[in-house]
Amino acid sequence: MQWCASAPGKTFEDEEGLVVYFSQGSGSTHLITEVAAFILEVLAMGPATTDELLHQIAIGADDITEQELQESVHELLEELQASELIEAA
Amino acid sequence: MVLLKDLNPDEFQHRLKHQGLRIRCGPYVYNLQSAEQKIIDGLSLLYADFEVILEETFADFHIAMRPSGWSQQLRGVVEFYWDGRCPMNIIEVRHSYAFLEWGMNWCVSIGSDEYLKLHAAVLEKNNKALIMPGLPGAGKSTLCAALTLSGWRLLSDEHALVPLHTGTVVPLCRPVSLKNESIDIIREFDSSAVLSQVAEETHKGRVAHMKADLAPNSHDATPVPTALMIFPQYEAGAEFSLRRKLKTEAFMFAGLHSFNYKLLGETGFDTMTQLMRSVDCFDLRYSSLEEALAAVNHLEAEVFKE
Amino acid sequence: MNNLLLQVIDNPAVCVDFTPGQWDVLIPQARNSLLLATLYRLLEQRDLLDKIPLPPRNHLFSGVVTHDRQMLSLDYEVKWLLRAVQQLEVPLVLLKGGAYLQAQLPAAGGRLISDIDLLVPEPQINAVEAAFNAAGWLGGHTDSYDERYYREWMHEIPPLSHIERGSTLDVHHTIIPPTANPNTDASKLIAAARELRPGLMVLAPMDMVIHSATHLFHEGDFNHGFRDVLDLDRLLRHFAETESGFWDELVPRAIELDLLKSLFYGLRYSQKIFGTPVPPQVLAASYEGVPTKALVPLMDFLFMRVLAPNHFSCARRFDGVARFCLYVRSHYLRMPMGLLVLHLGRKAWKRRFTKAVDVEDPEYAEDGDRD
């Protein structure tokens, strides 16, 4: 499955793992996790498949099993889609 | 500059009843019109040190409180007029002053989008501003009144007005609204506090307003740099706690309880970002007013020094 | 009458010399007419913003903040609307303010909207409603009386509100209640509509003008009457320049749609108020659409009152009477008489219980002006 960002966005970060994300398409603001922000950052550069995203995230995550990672990323993508931040390309 | 207390009572009442009395509050001029005794009393008590403008001027908000006709007059009710329209329910005469104060807030709440407006109390010390956003019932008004009576300058008990693309707040000092038990708490806290007559049985319970322009520069509308954001939470019997709050969470909370964050779109986001970069954020949970005051003063000493 | 707003719209440069006392009248006039943002854009186009004092300029700016946000939201909602009906291959025709904004007409400069008005072909209205429901726009707080009122007597389904984003849709299948004008064939409007981009249409220029006039003179709510006539003036001036044969074909088209009377009044008051350059022969031809010509002076008396900015500075004697007469008239035009009495009664009754406003409730601040 290929994903793209619904619209460009802007972020505000504090040091501790949460990111405020502003979507310029809808004008809505979301509090998202670092991983979600990372996905949006990757998609801002261009569309990517679920596998490509998984691969990129796995580079930074060494304390989690392959399956856990897959499950949580799938869930995250669904949530981002439901929040209208990403959509199927 | 003419202050309300300098006007002779006849002229004050004449203006209020007829063309309207123009009072400067922070960056705005209100034109107030009413013949109600409650309003005459409230204004002369709480706005005595406000500037009134006698020459022809532009008023930002035109408010009148009067019965729409003889039928309302007989029933002892009045309407709240804003630019000649009535956006609110009819008001019992005995509540008219409390509603005038709410109405004056309301005008700012629905317009004034040259500012990012947070629903918050704002105070100043050493030319640094403290912003206290809070849900109703969080005790922000009581704490705000107590700080005002303890050497802080009140900038607003309702609106943090942040000029767009800045990390500052513009003062809009007006009386502090106190509800229910806060009225007695504040009376006990400082017996010299000047309070309006209590409006009983409003939709918010008992309501009184406190004179709040107690600092020599209370009516200076120059923007003040922000430094501190405290989210107070009063809870009877709660153990005192003061914790640093994540700025991202503070951002979301303040945005959610802003009057126009969403409306301002990207400008709102940019302004909130700038504001958040200039403040330290804390959650304050307390059951004793003295403890809360001590904590705020302590933070002021620590944070403002930096 | 002290209609400063009209003077400024006519010639924006005059406000550069306004006294504080004149600004004190102009800003409330503009606010009550929903024209703060329109004034801001007019002054901006002429590079005059810097020449006016900051306090009133801030109020104009506040208007433009709302306008800009509405444009952004409209773009966003339209995107989702088109997706919702993608499978149906039904054209969505935007009406009124939403159409002016999306088509980037001069009437859009600073124009505020509240709901998104759509025209869809009647045979497909149920399918469209189902598609909107599936996409999150649901019918809200209507009781069964309201439901019947909308579906049977009006020209729309009850308003749909998006469960997440709160946007409101008014989906119409004709531009005038069938009870008022059974001869207006909406399929003709849809057939002539122009495509803005795939799936999204607006009425053809003449139809847009005729609808604007019809809407104005069949509405009971004249609170924004001044703004609505300004819409008409701007549409007329624009299309007269950009559409060849516009004036020649306008009256025949209104006859075809059986809306000549509304067009006549629209042209008449647009010209009377804003000096719209309507060719005399067009005005004369549209006058043929007025069945009871003896009533025209009375209508002038009523309309010229209610179409001024709704502010005491423009108030004249009998304003209240005029508003009431036209309110009754609009309902009389809309519905059979028995139903009218019932509806007015109910509306008044309901208003008593729904007017409560909590001034300390920050949510209230988000309730923008109503269209």
Image (cartoon, coloured by chain):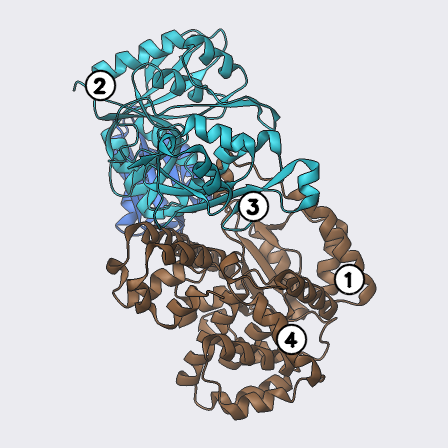
Chain colours: A blue, B cyan, C brown
Circle 3 crowding by C-alpha within 10 Å: few under 14, some 14–19, many from 20: some
Report helix, strand or loop for mark 2.
Answer: helix
Give the mark nearer the N terminus: 1 vs 4. Answer: 4
Depicted C141 relative to depicted C240: above or below: above
What residue sits right under mark 4 in the picture? C299
User: Could you tell me how far apart the alpha carbons at marks 2 and 3 are, in whole angstroms?
Assistant: 43 Å
Q: Which mark is nearer the camera, 1 or 2?
A: 1
The span from disc 2 to disc 4 (Cα, nearest Å) is 69 Å
Amino acid type of disc 3? Pro
* Badge 4 density bin: few <14, some 14–19, many ≥20, Cα 10 Å: some
Q: Nearer the viewer, mark 4 or mark 3?
A: 4
Position of residue C47 measured from the top left corner of the image (x, y, whole percent)? 25, 65
Q: Amino acid at mark 4?
A: Met
Q: Could you give the CA–CA distance between mark 4 and mark 3, rounded to whole angstroms?
A: 29 Å
Marks 4 and 3: same chain? no
Residue kind at label 2, given as amino acid type: Val
The numbered mark at residue B87 is 3
Q: Residue C340 got which mark?
A: 1
